[in-house]
């Protein structure tokens, strides 16, 4: 009896040490995350005092790091129509339409303008040119780079996409519940894989980073918007973390698809993907809203703790794999999947 109690006591002690270790890991992850939020968040400025730089290059670099775009930046009209003022001629305008492309040709400062003192000259062709306030230009134009346009499209229409996907998932869930069929869901009735939960965690991480940049370093995001890249190198640390999170999200998504269609039928896999998409989009919106009021970091730390706890359970519950079919086993013996004996 004493040996048995000692055995259970040892297990409880081991479990206590494991939980304590997970809490320490979660705390370290939280501190690490907060540390890079206060680290370098801005692009390094070039040395404008370099005597080898020409006046035109120096002015161009100055505009680039002050306004985040410069001469010869290519833009595309997104508004239905835009009027360019043919200054200094009064009441003379050139009209541009959606899809027209222009290039930044010149800057001018009008201190007397109470609306916006910065004016930008845009050229559509040699004949069609004109001036526009910078604030109006930023609302009516988008950079022609495909990454910038993807950023604009996602930030402009993600609410509609969320509503459509969420409504579709709810409709499918109600239909399957009505027919009394079991529905696989992330975390609650999950497949035998940690990748779906990790995918949601990565979405929460990227959303937290994104909103942190918007709150603490909006000019950094604006510079990235006009000068985008998919490389996590040679960008500020927070942008590097964000881009690495995006790449990891894509890699884990491929792993999810591989596990999903290996464990479920095609129809069940599609239903699961709809639920997973809804969970990811919910994480995106929730962590953006939570980070905007400065509590998203606590929720992210809690999410990391939940994932590490699930990871520990998964590792302890399936230490073996069947030598024939490769499925996970809790202990040695007869495989419940193929019937092979594992010793």
Image (tube, grey):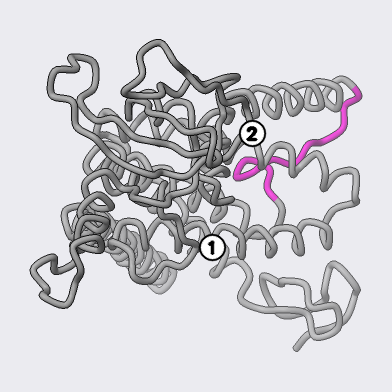
Q: Which quadrant does the N terminus fall into?
A: bottom left
Q: Secondary structure at mark 1?
A: helix
* Contact flag, marks 1 and 2 (Cβ < 8 Å): no
Foreground pick, 142 / 280? 142
Q: Which residue is mark 1?
A: 247
Q: Nearer the viewer, mark 1 or mark 2?
A: 2
**Residue 190's disc number:** none
x and y, in percent, of residue 132 in the image? 37, 26
Give residue 272's quadrant in the image.
top right
Classify residue 85 as left or right of residue 153: left
Classify residue 163 as left or right of residue 3: right
Instruction: State the residue lying farthest toward the top.
Output: 91
> What residue is at 21 percent from the left and 46 percent from the top?
66
Give residue 3's quadrant in the image.
bottom left
Dominant secondary structure, magenta: loop
**Residue 188 lies within the magenta run:** yes
Q: Secondary structure at mark 2?
A: loop
Label 1 crowd bin: few (<14), some (14–19), many (20+), radius 10 Å: some
> What residue is at 27 percent from the left and 34 percent from the top?
295
Foreground pick, 192 / 296? 296
Label 2 crowd bin: few (<14), some (14–19), many (20+), radius 10 Å: some
Location of residue 73 with respect to 172 vertically, above or below: below
> What residue is at 91 percent from the left and 24 percent from the top?
179
**Residue 99's disc number:** 2
Write the start and end of the magenta stretch as one range: 179-190
**Residue 309 lies within the magenta run:** no
Marks 1 and 2, the one that precedes in the sequence: 2
How far is mark 1 from mark 2, CA to CA? 30 Å
């Amino acid at each position: 009896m004493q040996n048995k109690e000692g055995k259970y006591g040892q297990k409880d002690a081991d479990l206590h040490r494991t939980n304590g270790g997970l809490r320490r890991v979660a705390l370290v992850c939280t501190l690490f995350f907060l540390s890079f939020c206060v680290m370098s968040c801005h692009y390094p400025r070039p040395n404008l005092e370099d005597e080898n730089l020409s006046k035109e290059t120096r002015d161009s670099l100055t505009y680039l790091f002050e306004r985040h775009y410069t001469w010869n930046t290519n833009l595309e009209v997104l508004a239905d129509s835009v009027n360019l003022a043919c200054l200094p001629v009064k009441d003379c305008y050139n009209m541009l339409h959606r899809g027209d492309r222009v290039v930044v040709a010149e800057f001018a400062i009008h201190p007397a303008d109470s609306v916006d003192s910065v004016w930008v000259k845009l050229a559509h062709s040699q004949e069609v040119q004109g001036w526009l306030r910078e604030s109006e230009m930023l609302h009516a134009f988008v950079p022609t780079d495909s990454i910038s346009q993807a950023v604009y499209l996602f930030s402009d229409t993600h609410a509609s996409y969320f509503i459509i996907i969420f409504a579709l998932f709810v409709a499918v869930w109600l239909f399957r519940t009505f027919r009394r069929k079991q529905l696989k869901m992330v975390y609650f009735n999950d497949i035998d894989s940690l990748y779906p939960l990790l995918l949601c965690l990565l979405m929460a991480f990227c959303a937290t980073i994104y909103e942190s940049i918007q709150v603490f370093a909006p000019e950094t995001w604006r510079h990235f918007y006009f000068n985008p890249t998919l490389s996590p190198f040679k960008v500020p640390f927070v942008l590097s973390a964000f881009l690495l999170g995006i790449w990891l999200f894509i890699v884990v998504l491929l792993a999810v698809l591989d596990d999903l269609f290996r464990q479920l039928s095609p129809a069940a896999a599609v239903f699961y993907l709809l639920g997973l998409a809804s969970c990811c989009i919910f994480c995106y919106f929730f962590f953006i809203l939570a980070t905007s009021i400065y509590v998203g970091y606590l929720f992210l730390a809690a999410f990391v703790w939940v994932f590490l706890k699930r990871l520990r359970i998964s590792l302890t519950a399936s230490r073996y794999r069947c030598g024939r079919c490769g499925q996970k086993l809790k202990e040695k013996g007869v495989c419940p999947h193929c019937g092979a004996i594992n010793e």
